[in-house]
Amino acid sequence: MKELRQKDKWGLGKPSVMIFDVNETLIDFQSLNPLFKKTFGDEKVLREWLGHLILYSMTLTMSGLYKDYWDIGRGVFRMVGGIHKIDVTDDDVEALKKGMQTMPAWPDCKEGLAKLKDAGFRLVTLTNSPPPTSGGKSPLEHSGIAGLFEKQYYIQEAKAYKPAPIVYHMVAQDLDVAPSDCCMVATHVWDTIGGQAAGMQSALITRPGNAVLPVDGLPQPNIIAKDTVDLATKAAAAWKTGTRKAA
């Protein structure tokens, strides 16, 4: 009965929409390694900064507050500098902002996303990053893959960061589909759990620095893939046969 309840809750039917996270899932944060090496003397500090960035964006949402993702990123950059007793300059902060907005796409994305579109999935994105300012480009546009998506969604419209349920529901409602018709695709387990808690299915892409969270009682991704090409292959297999998870 326990397994049946879990299947009923997380769903088995083929979704019509793939909702992609952007940061790390589609664009390569490792491109910022040289900046962190230059600033902190160790590129591994990137992971520390990113962890704080995610933590404090969630903290603001849980506290009923909101600040722009770039603002949080720059503030956390200075905070990490304080932790490591490093003098972070204004030039360093400006380089971080530019880097966050111009990261390249992972090399598998164009092929994998095209395969998913050919398989009949609608593709959209949902990102914690803010929309571009007037005349500017989104990170997806800079990376050259924006044209593969039907629409780009930003959490700014809800003034709440993922994994708040309102953010996922905002996308489903705008597309006029049920949450169960959506699959949240991300490289972060907190994002796949958020999508599933909002009634969606999920797919985890295990980019470098990310892995599954094997905790009993937590929703596990319907699909676990190494990249978007692998995701397209496993999605075709999983939802053709009705299999719950293709790992």
Image (tube, rainbow, N blue to C red):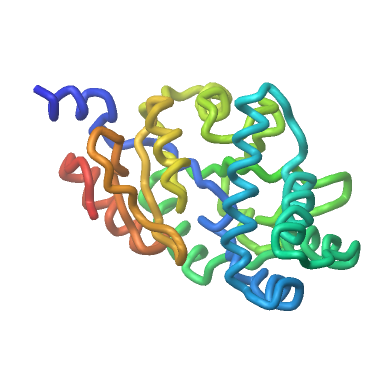
Q: In x, y percent, where is residue 188?
A: 46, 49
The image quarter containing residue 97 is bottom right
82 vs 11, left or right, is: right
**Above or below, 111 relative to 186:** below
Q: In x, y percent, where is residue 22?
A: 58, 51
Along the line of sight, which residue is nearer the eye, 55 or 172? 55
The residue located at (34%, 62%) in the rendering is 230
The residue located at (58%, 40%) in the rendering is 126
Along the line of sight, which residue is nearer the eye, 243 or 220? 220
Along the line of sight, which residue is nearer the eye, 20 or 116? 20
The residue located at (29%, 59%) in the rendering is 233
The residue located at (62%, 33%) in the rendering is 59
The image quarter containing residue 12 is top left
Along the line of sight, which residue is nearer the eye, 196 or 238? 196
Quadrant where the image shows the N terminus: top left
151 vs 199, left or right, is: right
**Above or below, 151 relative to 49:** above
Q: Residue furthest left?
A: 1
